[in-house]
Image: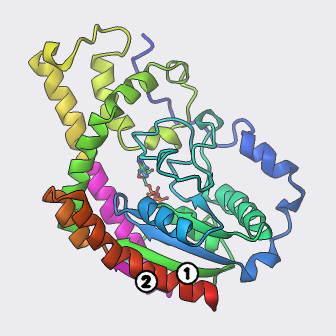
Amino acid sequence: QHYSSFLPPLLPLNRRPTRWRTLMASTPTVAAPNKDNNNSKIVVIMGATGTGKSRLSIDLATRFFPSEIINTDKMQVYKGLDITTNKITLHERKSIRHHFLGEFDPEDGELTPSEFRHLADETISDIVSREKTPFLVGGSNSFIYSLLVEEYDPELNVFDGFHSDSVSSNLRYNCCFLWVDASLPVLFDYLNKRVDEMLESGMFEELVEFFNSEKMRNNSLSRAGLLKAIGVPEFEKYFKMYPPGKVKGGGWRDWDRVRRAVYEEAVREIKENTCQLAKRQIGKILKLRDGGWDLRRLDATTTFKMLMKGEDGGDWRRVWEKQVLEPSVKIVKRFLDE
Ligand code: ATP
């Protein structure tokens, strides 16, 4: 009966001290805001899911070496589900050091924006003290906002509602913002294709293992953390009907019509929710721009159109370099030379 409900009820936050909460409490620099960081130059790469932020970050970090990358995707901070959450692979990282990527144990509960603000600020100080440039890369605008503003109020959700009045443009670092964007219909087509590619690279097998893991059977994960990753709630119904490890799996060919339909429905929901996420993320970015953040928009639409047409890899790569990478290099160079 382990599988009667995979998702545990919401646990009160702070029910037990987490590894990073203990870490924060024991770090002497916690109380004092790090004023030295005010003039620190950091490059921030923003954009909806799937727009190519990770690729751009590596392209730039290898050009503006020495630099290190701080992940600002709230799902990729946790250990596990690497394919499902789309973490950049070790090979793709090209030896650039990454922070906050798979570092947090999901059993320790949710990493909140306030905790991220504190821990990432310390990481920035550390990177800067080693005379390297920090690059922030990821799609969680709540993490980006909490980290960058001078005064952060965890009670205030600046992304609520239609207006940008509550967005603060008073930032605690010297930031250069790059926003990778693409027209929504083109991005949606690409995201649907990407979900199929993720499944081909083992996302379903990863979820089978995850749902079959001890932490899932013990209900020891907080609903607020990794369990929110797109792919987990969508496949919950499937795994309730076909519990991993209990039902003899066989291959797709052995599945009956009902099993195939339940699987297809989960995939359809993943595609739909990924597109909705992208739309919401763009809405939040526009709010930050309207609130006074100086975002430099880079249009990757043509790159994605070429990718979708299945054009030769060399061709889309050339368009990416011309329309996204080269302008970004110019912007970052000017910023770092100032
Ligand atoms: P929100 O306040 O809606 O959580 P946010 O800006 O803090 O927004 P987002 O990055 O937009 O954070 O993530 C919102 C939700 O989208 C997550 O809670 C999760 O369900 C899903 N999500 C985000 N990133 C990923 C990812 N890498 N993999 C899977 N799901 C993700």
Which is nearer the N-term, disc 1 or disc 2?
1
Left or right: residue 331 versus residue 121 is left
Q: Residue at x 73, y 65 (%)?
A: 127
- Inspect the image, locate mark 2, and give the three-letter code of the amino acid beneath it: Arg
Q: Label 2: how many residues lie within 10 Å, few (<14), some (14-19) or many (20+)?
A: some
**Quadrant location, the N terminus:** top left
Residue 182 spot, x, y in % from top left = 28, 71
Report which quarter residue 323 is drawn in.
Answer: bottom left
Q: Residue at x 40, y 79 (%)?
A: 326
- Inspect the image, locate mark 1, and give the three-letter code of the amino acid beneath it: Cys
CB under 8 Å between discs 1 and 2: yes
Residue 256 spot, x, y in % from top left = 12, 15
**Quadrant location, the C terminus:** bottom right
| Start-end of magenta stretch | 272-298
Q: Residue at x 24, y 71 (%)?
A: 301
Residue 198 spot, x, y in % from top left = 31, 41
Instruction: Please check the rendered image and state whether residue 274 is part of the magenta-colored stretch, yes or no.
Output: yes
**SS label for mark 1:** strand
Instruction: Please check the rendered image and state whether residue 220 is part of the magenta-colored stretch, yes or no.
Output: no
Look at the image and tell me whether residue 161 can be seen.
Answer: no
Mark 1–mark 2 distance (CA, rounded to whole Å): 8 Å
Instruction: List the residue tagged with mark 1.
Output: 176
Establish if 272 lies above or below 297.
above
Name of the residue lying farthest toward the left: 257
Q: Residue at x 41, y 46 (%)?
A: 86
Residue 322 spot, x, y in % from top left = 32, 78
Q: Label 1: how many residues lie within 10 Å, few (<14), some (14-19) or many (20+)?
A: many
Establish if 38 lies above or below 84.
below
Instruction: List the residue tagged with mark 2.
Output: 296
**SS label for mark 2:** strand
Look at the image and tell me whether residue 92 can be seen.
Answer: yes
